[in-house]
Image (spheres, helix red, strand yellow):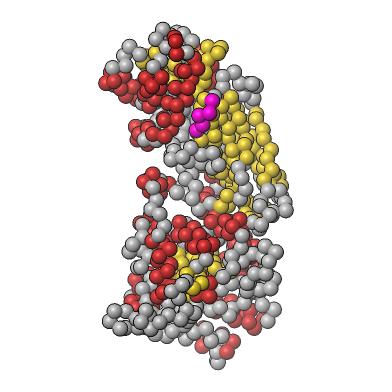
Amino acid sequence: MPLGERGGWERSESRYCGVETDFSDDVPSLLSFHISTGGFDYVLAPLMNPSYRPSLVEGNGLDTKVLPVSGSDLVLAPSQWSSHVVGKISSWIDLDSEDEVLRLDSETTLKQEIAWATHLSVQACLLPTPKGTSCANYARCVNQILQGLTNLQLWLRIPLVKSDGDSMDATSEDLNDSWELWNTFRLLCEHDTKLSVALDVQSTLPSESSLGRWMGESVRAAIISTDSFLTNTRGYPCLSKRHQKLISGFFDHAVQVVVSGKPVHNLTKASDSNAEGTQKHPLRSYLDYVAYLFQKMEALPEQERIELGYRDFLQAPLQPLMDNLEAQTYETFERDSIKYIQYQRAVAKALVDRVPDEKASELTTVLMVVGAGRGPLVRASLQAAEETERKLKVYAVEKNPNAVVTLHNLVKLEGWEDIVTIISCDMRFWSAPEKADILVSELLGSFGDNELSPECLDGAQRFLKPDGISIPSSYTSFIQPVTASKLYNDIKAHKDLAHFETAYVVKLHSVAKLAPSQSVFTFTHPNLATKINNQRYKKLHFNLPSDAGSALVHGFAGYFDSVLYKDVHLGIEPTTATPNMFSWFPIFFPLRKPVEVHPDSPLEVHFWRCCGSSKVWYEWSVSLPTPSPMHNTNGRSYWVGL
């Protein structure tokens, strides 16, 4: 395992490298040559002699149902079949051919070869690229096969091409954008959760925007032909900068590389042999270069490694107003030092603005932390007071009785008894003994307002002085259309409507962001310009980059950006995200049925924020280019309890 031995465990799925081979009836020798000698992890090989055609088999009746020429399953142990072999379905099959004999031969052969692969327990099978512009019958047959599969995965071979107005290498003169071919095929397959893509990487690549679409698709392998490699100054194979960037992106998305083709680089015999003089594998230099690309990738930062288990994992949003958070949840958020540094900066600026230097020793600022939790905002506020040499009186308001216990112990431990007053009460029902100069809270959710910060802070303004300062002072939610095949399939697997009408907190990873994000709702404190309406509404128009090609929208990623005070920001919106902060993952609003969009056709999206007597919820839909159903209508699915 040349890639995996020296690579990081966090990219374990992509550390395996395969090699595409021709058919061999001596499978043990094939594995010995390519794995033991060559160093590859598995072979991508035909399981049956490609010269076989059912119509050419002599005899009738049961004779025609005998398996075609292939090696015995006994030549390898089951563990070897499953770990070292990916089956390759005969490339000649054409299930949409106008030639009836060829079409019927193709259908019979496809079913026979998949049945044989299932019998061998191989990990996956590579399906040949659809031929021509129609693939309906091919998809129908594959869909039937997928219904009966349990462990076997199917990879559909697709050439990575898009015309972009230029001449591109393609397998068909009718093929201008291979994504269209893939999209047509998978939409015809209802049972597509076991169907992935194996991309044939060409010597010429489409635009960056076009390539980006594939990062949200279920790409399993990248097949790189030796013809795609350049030659470095020493005569060894290498890849262009764009190819290197693409392969590195694939590594980061658990995509495996498969080397294909004959060696095209003339290496000297000395360099082509090992120390003992034994001839090296002819493709070893290509494998070594792929390993080099894998090994030179930077290790993930510690926080990213901690979050690995949350990548593309659907989570229900927290409901801190309705539920009392647990100690482990508090601890996770409290480790985010960047967030509290930003809060400390904002409080320091507010203190300086409230109290001039000449009165710093005379005036005491009243600061209320509403939703104090276990005290991190209290600590940040007191540190800001010490930094600015201002006097502070703090009210720490918290509804969770378990967190209040921790607060009391913290105040006693730090000796803050004369400065901090703990209030065990829901901020909405507390009657403050005096007005506050500064109101501090961290009620923001992934979408900014989805933890009811607008409602809570609007109610809390009754104990803020008319000229008082709210931290945060404003926050805005954003959405962005995304391709997210994995997330969509995970939701689809539940087979009910409720899961498609739920917004999820997700550490987005295998996602293609199709257009820049746009703002949805903005709330400002104190004194909201307009009171929170029973229904807030926003219509947005997105346009794909002109060179991107068509894409499938599976849903919308939601973010927020907030102004804590003046120029101190906090947020996760991609273009303005606070560096190294991890308290919030984006939110994902799924679509029941994915919507295909084109660069010349806008995507029109509608979002509503609705308030009932006991809850707040969102509704969303698409009206262009094709209408989608209304999602979360009338709050059928939960959001946040009031």
Is 567 one of the magenta-colored residues?
Answer: yes
Q: Nearer the viewer, residue 249 or 81?
A: 249
Would you say residue 399 sits in the magenta stretch? no
Residue at horizontal 66 percent and vertical 52 percent from the top? 545
Question: Residue 498 at x, y = what percent?
Answer: 55, 43
Q: Is residue 104 above or below residue 638?
A: below
User: Would you identify the image quadrant in which residue 619 lies?
Assistant: top right
Left or right side of 3 for 203: right
Between 181 and 541, which is closer to the camera in this rendering? 541
When the figure is inspected, residue 627 is found, relative to residue 470, above or below; the finding is below
Q: Which residues are magenta?
A: 566-570
Q: Kindly tell me whether residue 450 is visible in this rendering.
A: no
Q: Position of residue 453 (x, y in %)?
A: 52, 26
Query: Residue 424 sits in which quadrant?
Result: top left
Instruction: Using the rendered view, name the quadrant where residue 363 is placed.
Output: top left
- Residue in the image at 56% along x and 78% along y: 91
On the image, the x and y values in percent for residue 316 come to: 48, 40
Name the residue rendered at 56%, 70% in the picture: 203
Magenta stretch secondary structure, dominant: strand
Task: Report x, y in % for residue 229.
Answer: 50, 72
Q: Does 506 sit left or right of 82 as displayed?
A: right
Q: Can residue 624 be seen in the rendering of this structure?
A: yes
